[in-house]
Image (cartoon, rainbow, N blue to C red):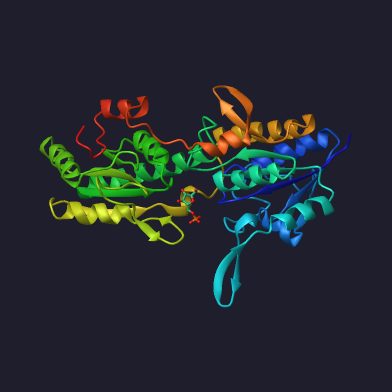
């Protein structure tokens, strides 16, 4: 039976979103369904901002970064901010979302997003809306899937930055710090640090000590290397210390690399420079790995809709794309295991985590 399906992207954007949209739309259209795009995530269901998605509208989007459907990391319908008497307070607009889904005649919604979007999807599912979810984030911190698309592209961009910093660090005998994203998970820092041959990697999962960073720089100096590359995850923190926020109220992380630089500057005589990679690692064209993973996720989401398997999220397990309950996906985050094999390999090649181990 022909279905009318909505697709939306929520939360921060990420390379590969368009590849998911394209694959899901193609799969659904091939099975004789009609597809509409909901703009700006769940917000589009409050404003009736929808567009028709056809072969024509999705043509050429596979390699493009960003999202054709636009996105926002605000506008959670369950906690929708309004200004009341000059103050911001949150109201529940989920009933309006449900009403609009019904008014649009949607038989299901595919939500592509990170933990925030997936939580909203689960709550709407509990209220009777047929939802299928696709996990996305450059942070790779969702436990239900081995990898999220966008992560490897962010790693590739960060690795390129490490490579570029290497040559200039070496020319000037400088300590170069590179701050990368990832929220409270150190995956981007760990992968790009290893791929780029960093000397020190600072992760949220392994609190660092300034004396250990200094010791590691001095020991390289003794061996004749007068430059250092330090990759710092934005969520990294000093032993007994706290994360560095650009804006504490919205919990926007940033600036930790400047703190590390200031702390070590008191103890070493090398020049120090800081680079904060920022949104460069989130924009642009997805690398082949992410295009393929995103395409597989989009196709699998389309198939779940076709089979009427709602309340599920697509996930990568080994070589397989599987369907897991959205509830499971939002219940556990995935962090770097300080005693795990990745960290052990890094330590094995002499990378310091600033913890003295
Ligand atoms: O979750 C993706 C991410 O890019 C994080 O790595 C980063 O902390 C955050 O989003 C940045 O958010 P915004 O785009 O709102 O500044």
Residue 76 in sight: no
Residue 114 image position (x, y, % from top left): 56, 44
Query: Is residue 300 found left or right of 329 in the rendered image?
Result: right
Quadrant (top left/top right/bottom left/bottom right) for the C terminus: top left
Question: Residue at coordinates 65% horizontally, 45% vertically from top-left?
Answer: 123
Q: Which residue of the protein is positioned furthest toward the left in this rendering?
A: 222
Q: Which residue of the protein is positioned furthest toward the bottom in this rendering?
A: 85
Residue 16 image position (x, y, % from top left): 60, 42
In terms of image quadrants, where is residue 315?
top right
Q: Which residue of the protein is positioned furthest toward the top in this rendering?
A: 319
Quadrant (top left/top right/bottom left/bottom right) for the N terminus: top right
Question: Residue at coordinates 45% horizontally, 44% vertically from top-left?
Answer: 157
Above or below 46: residue 179 = above
Residue 250 image position (x, y, % from top left): 46, 60
In terms of image quadrants, where is residue 74?
bottom right
Question: Residue at coordinates 30% horizontally, 48% vertically from top-left?
Answer: 237
Residue 246 in sight: yes
Residue 66 image position (x, y, % from top left): 60, 50
- Decide which of 78, 356 is in the foreground and name it: 78
């Amino acid at each position: 039976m022909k279905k009318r399906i909505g697709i939306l992207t929520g939360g921060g954007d990420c390379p590969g979103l368009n590849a998911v949209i394209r694959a899901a739309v193609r799969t659904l259209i091939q099975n004789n369904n009609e597809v509409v795009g909901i703009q700006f995530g769940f917000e589009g269901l409050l404003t009736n901002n929808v567009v028709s998605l056809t072969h024509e509208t999705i043509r050429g989007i596979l390699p493009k970064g960003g999202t054709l459907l636009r996105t926002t990391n605000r506008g959670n319908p369950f906690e929708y901010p309004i200004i009341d008497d000059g103050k911001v307070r949150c109201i529940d607009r989920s009933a309006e979302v449900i009403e609009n889904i019904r008014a649009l005649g949607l038989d299901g919604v595919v939500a592509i997003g990170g933990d925030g979007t997936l939580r909203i999807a689960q709550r709407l599912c509990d209220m009777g809306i047929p939802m299928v979810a696709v996990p996305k984030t450059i942070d790779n911190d969702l436990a239900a899937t081995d990898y999220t698309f966008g992560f490897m592209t962010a790693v590739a961009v960060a690795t390129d930055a490490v490579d570029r910093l290497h040559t200039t660090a070496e020319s000037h005998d400088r300590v170069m710090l590179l701050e990368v994203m990832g929220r409270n998970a150190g995956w981007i820092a760990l992968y790009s640090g290893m791929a780029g041959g960093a000397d020190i990697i600072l992760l949220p999962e392994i609190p660092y000590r300034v004396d250990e960073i200094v010791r590691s720089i001095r020991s390289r100096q003794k061996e004749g290397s007068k430059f250092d590359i330090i990759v710092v995850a934005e969520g990294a923190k000093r032993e007994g210390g706290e994360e560095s926020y650009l804006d504490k109220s919205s919990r926007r992380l940033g600036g930790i690399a400047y703190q590390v630089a200031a702390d070590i500057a008191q103890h070493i005589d090398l020049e120090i420079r800081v680079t904060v990679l920022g949104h460069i690692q989130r924009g642009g064209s997805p690398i082949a790995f992410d295009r393929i993973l995103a395409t597989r996720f989009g196709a699998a989401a389309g198939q779940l809709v076709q089979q009427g398997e709602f309340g599920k999220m697509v996930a990568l397990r080994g070589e397989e794309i599987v369907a897991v309950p959205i509830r499971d996906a939002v219940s556990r985050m995935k962090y770097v295991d300080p005693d795990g094999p990745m960290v052990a390999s890094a330590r094995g090649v002499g990378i310091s985590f600033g913890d003295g181990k």
